[in-house]
Amino acid sequence: MLFEDWRKKIIFDLQKKLKLANVMAVPRVEKVIVHMGIAAEKDDQEAISQFAKQLALITGQKPKICRAKKSVSGFKLRKGEIIGLQVTLRGRRMYDFLEKLFHLVLPRLRDFRGLPEEKFDKSANYSFGVPEQTVFPEIKVEDVKKVKGVGITIVTSTNDKEEAKELLKSLGLHFAN
């Protein structure tokens, strides 16, 4: 289990690698946000409930429904319409999801050679997308009516991109060379 490995081994190895004096200074993963944009299906309630069930299966947690904050005529979007689903994972569930993501889901992607290193933002958070929800082991392909991408953001406690990169490497994320 990644959670126990983090507490017993990885945190101390990372402290030595980053040459930090205190264990509390070691960067951590604060939360993982899993989201799915469904603005194209905003009128199809059956599809929205199907995507919500799939996201709940993937994360083990009921998704929050995100609504439009204001109307945008160019996108034919009205204030209050459903535009996405989001789940925020913390604690043990977060580590279980990361372990599944790094060791099962990402290697199942076609031509996967690692994720690009350039996906860090200025706060050293890492965001990437999985092109379809069917790569998750909980989703049965025959039950999927419409394929949808899933966005994942890993929020770290550091602002240094190199420290965040070492943190994600130590947890098992493979970066492209």
Image (cartoon, helix red, strand yellow):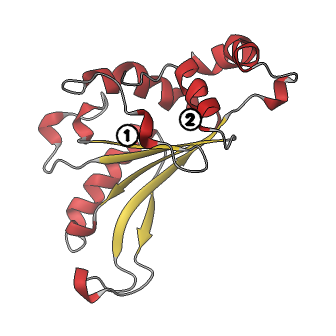
C-alpha distance separating marks 2 and 1: 14 Å
* Numbered label tally: 2
Q: Quadrant of residue 32?
A: top right
Q: Quadrant of the rendered structure where residue 152 is?
A: top left
In this rendering, the label closer to the viewer, 2 or 1? 2
Residue 131 position (above or below residue 104): below
Q: Of helix, strand and loop, which one carries label 2? A: helix
Residue 61 is left or right of residue 13, and the answer is left
The amino acid on which the numbered mark 1 sits, given as a three-letter code, is Leu
Q: Earlier in the sequence, mark 2 or mark 1?
A: 1
Does 147 appear above or below 8? Answer: below
Is any atom of residue 7 visible in this view?
Answer: yes
Q: Which residue is mark 2?
A: 94
The residue singled out by tag 1 in the image is 57
Residue 124 coordinates in the image, percent (x, y): 59, 43
Q: How packed is label 2: few (under 14 Cα within 10 Å), some, or many (20 or more)? A: many
Q: Position of residue 112 (x, y in %)?
A: 26, 24
Q: Nearer the viewer, residue 131 or 161?
A: 161
**What residue lies at 87% left-to-right and 21% top-to-bottom?**
21
Give the percent coordinates (x, y) of residue 92: 62, 31
| Among the 4 quarters of the image, the one containing residue 37 | bottom left
Crowding around mark 1 (Cα neighbors within 10 Å: few <14, some 14 to 19, many 20+) is some
Query: Is residue 148 toward the left or the right of residue 96 in the image?
Result: left
* Residue in the image at 16% along x and 35% along y: 141
Residue type (three-letter) at the residue carrying disc 2: Met
Residue at 46% from the left image edge and 39% from the top image edge: 60
The C terminus sits in image quarter: top left
